[in-house]
Amino acid sequence: TEVAPGAVHLPDWLDASRQHELLEACREWARPPAGLRSVRTPGGGTMTARQVCLGWHWYPYAYARTVVDGDGAPVKPFPEWLGELGRSAVRDAFGAPSPTAGSAPRVTSPPYDIALINFYDGDARMGMHRDSDEKSDDPVVSLSLGDTCVFRFGNTETRTKPYTDVELRSGDLFVFGGPSRLAYHGVPKVYPDTAPPELGLAGRLNITLRVSGR
Ligand code: MD3
Ligand code: FE
């Protein structure tokens, strides 16, 4: 479903076995060094979702190669297979890239090199924000595992209405490209105990794949 221009939701994109594989990989990445951490914002707040990064380390509001706001370790590498997963997500959302005359739009697939993985437990949520620290306008790929959440997809002008609320469930894919790339968005609610029981995850996990443009 195209929720807004360039914003495509593909429910149940990952089958149970791919969800399980991705969850196991996330659990490995969450381990120290350069593992899961709480993110403190310059205003003195702490994000309620905890995060681990691959490829480039995000801290408010820039990217680094080491965990500058944590244990100082080098960021974990971004694996080749995760980039392939991102490109297949974009193909399924938008269709295969077609050759174009001249040099304007990209004819190859996006060279994903960043993963941000957010772990939501208890009352974790995420306020309305825009993701503008990447120096590329390639689409962001989002994969959800575990508990169902309300994902709020807004507009490019304000963090308030108009917005559309969409439920994201375990296995769902969402791709944000074109004019939706810079839209405000957030996670106002996670529904406890709604994960598929066979997954073995208490809480919610979201993986976003991005292109750094570096
Ligand atoms: C729209 N994550 O990591 S996923 C984030 O569920 C983030 O953890 C939320 O917002 C989560 O920055 C929402 C959907 C999402 C992710 C990135 C986007 C939507 C986006 C980037 C640009 C536009
Ligand atoms: Fe975001």
Image: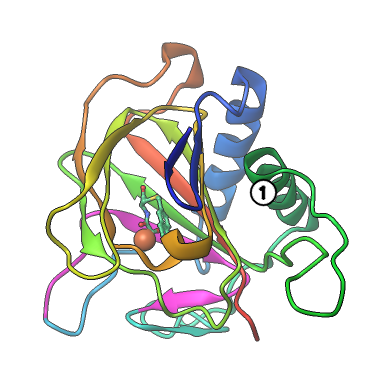
Quarter of the image with the C terminus is: bottom right
Asked if the beta carbon under badge 1 is closer than 8 A to the nearest atom of ligand 1, the reply is no
Q: Residue at x 50, y 75 (%)?
A: 57
Q: What residue is disc 1 on?
A: 90
Residue 82 is situated, as x and y percent measured from the top left of the image, at: 70, 52
Could you tell me the amino acid type at mark 1? Val
Protein image colouring: rainbow
Q: Position of residue 180 (x, y in %)?
A: 43, 59
Q: Quadrant of ligand 2?
A: bottom left
Secondary structure of the residue carrying tag 1 is helix
Residue 117's place in the image compared with 1, above or below, is below
Q: Note whether 97 is above or below 134 in the view shown.
A: above
User: Taking the image as drawn, is residue 12 in sight?
Assistant: yes
For the point 35% across and 37% down, which residue is it?
204
Q: Which residues are magenta?
A: 44-59
Q: In the rendered image, is residue 71 in sight?
A: no
Q: Is residue 104 magenta?
A: no
Badge 1: few (under 14), some or many (20 or more) residues near its Cα, within 10 Å? many
Residue shown at 44%/75% (left/top)? 58
Residue 87 drawn at (x, y percent): 73, 51
When the figure is inspected, residue 67 is found, relative to residue 49, above or below; the finding is below
Q: Residue 101: horizontal and vertical position, in percent?
A: 87, 72
